Amino acid sequence: PAGAASGLAGLLDDGQRAITIGLNAESGVGGFLEPGAKVDIVARLADRSTGQQITRTSAQQVTILAVGGRLTPGPVEVPPGTPPPPPASNVTI
């Protein structure tokens, strides 16, 4: 909106916060995540009573604001003859 800050701050409304989550090949859905995509956040924890690993959905339909440092969806343009960038190691929601 007019008068909004640039970058990530321009994507957040008053009172909102962003958090960055690290990725690996599995959690990053094989590199197919894009800014603007909706995802569920799943946590794997140790059950206090049994010590076994349990999985719980902690948030649903969360919007990805950034993938790595990229704030806009779409292909990353690289000059001809340049190798593509490595997959992002984090997302910001």
Image: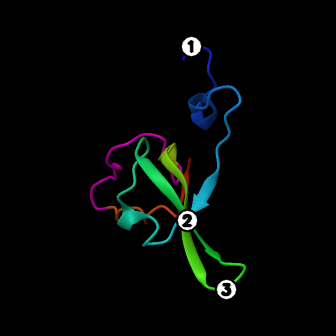
Q: Answer few, some or many: residues within 10 Å of disc 1's Cα (few below 14, many 20 plus, some between 14 and 19).
A: few
- Which SS does the magenta portion mostly show? loop
* Magenta residues, start to end: 67-81
Q: Answer few, some or many: residues within 10 Å of disc 2's Cα (few below 14, many 20 plus, some between 14 and 19).
A: few
Residue 48 versus residue 66 in the image, above or below: below
Residue 66 versus residue 49 in the image, above or below: above
Q: CA distance from mark 2 to mark 1?
A: 39 Å
- At 64% from the left and 25% from the top, the residue drawn is 5
Earlier in the chain: of badge 3 and badge 2, it is: 3
Any magenta on residue 70? Answer: yes
Q: Answer few, some or many: residues within 10 Å of disc 3's Cα (few below 14, many 20 plus, some between 14 and 19).
A: few
Q: Contact (CB < 8 A) between labels 2 and 1? A: no
Where is residue 4 shown, x and y percent of the image?
A: 61, 21
- Of marks 2 and 1, the one in the foreground: 2
Where is residue 43 shown, x and y percent of the image?
A: 58, 66
Residue 76 versus residue 14 in the image, above or below: below
Question: Which quadrant would residue 45 be assigned to in this image?
Answer: bottom right
> According to the image, label 2 marks what residue?
56
Position of the N terminus, as image quadrant, is top right
Q: Is residue 63 visible?
A: no
Which amino acid does the dot numbered 3 rest on? Thr
> According to the image, label 3 marks what residue?
50
> According to the image, label 1 marks what residue?
2
Which amino acid does the dot numbered 1 rest on? Ala
